[in-house]
Amino acid sequence: MPRSKRHLLATAQETLTPPPSLNENHAIAKVRKAEGKNLYSVELPSSSRTEGEEALLLLLVELPSRFRSQIWLKHGGYVVVDTAAFAGRDNKLDGEIVNVVRDEREWRKQAYWPAEFVKKSLYPEDSDEEESHAGQLPPSDDSNDER
């Protein structure tokens, strides 16, 4: 039997608003690939890794049943992962998705947002070069003004 609309709206509202702080076992991760059967490969930022680990840490995480068929994850999206969820089990899963980042602007304003996931501008400002004159009128000649 499908879930009620009330559960759907509650889940959607939960993913829109970021929490004031993250638990110590939670980390924001970037979705790299859907592995199938509600399993996703995610990348952790380097700030949440310990020294000596490889440069790119990929985890295999599970999407819990409360998000299945209600919230869709896309490649390059962000999720909050609990890395201690499957610590006691002996299996290939490294964690569980606790929350899905939907309103990315609000989440980026939080203090716990990783510096590695900051959006880079498509048009970097170069202070060494001259200012752009695109969209401006050409300079006027003073000789034409004296009639």
Image (cartoon, rainbow, N blue to C red):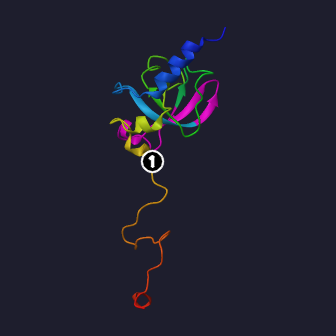
Q: Secondary structure at mark 1?
A: loop
Quadrant housing the C terminus? bottom left
Residue 15 spot, x, y in % from top left: 48, 26
Residue 36 spot, x, y in % from top left: 65, 28
Which residue occupies 41% across, 45% down?
116
Magenta range is 33-59
Residue 120 spot, x, y in % from top left: 45, 52
* Membership of 78 in magenta stretch: no
Quadrant housing the N terminus? top right
Between 134 and 44, the one lying in front of the other is: 134
How many numbered markers are drawn?
Answer: 1
Which residue occupies 36% across, 67% down?
127
Identity of the amino acid at label 1? Lys
Please, is residue 63 above or below residue 131 in the view? above
Q: Quadrant of residue 82?
A: top left
Q: Find the residue positioned furthest to the front.
A: 147
Q: Find the residue positioned furthest to the top.
A: 1
Please, is residue 3 above or below residue 132 in the view? above
Between 116 and 101, the one lying in front of the other is: 101
Residue 65 visible in the picture = no
Residue 20 spot, x, y in % from top left: 34, 27
Q: Quadrant of residue 19?
A: top left
Residue 2 visible in the picture = yes
Would you call the spot at circle 1 few (<14 residues within 10 Å), some (14-19), or many (20 or more)? few
- Mark 1, residue position: 119
Please, is residue 53 above or below residue 128 in the view? above
State left or right for residue 24 relative to residue 134: left
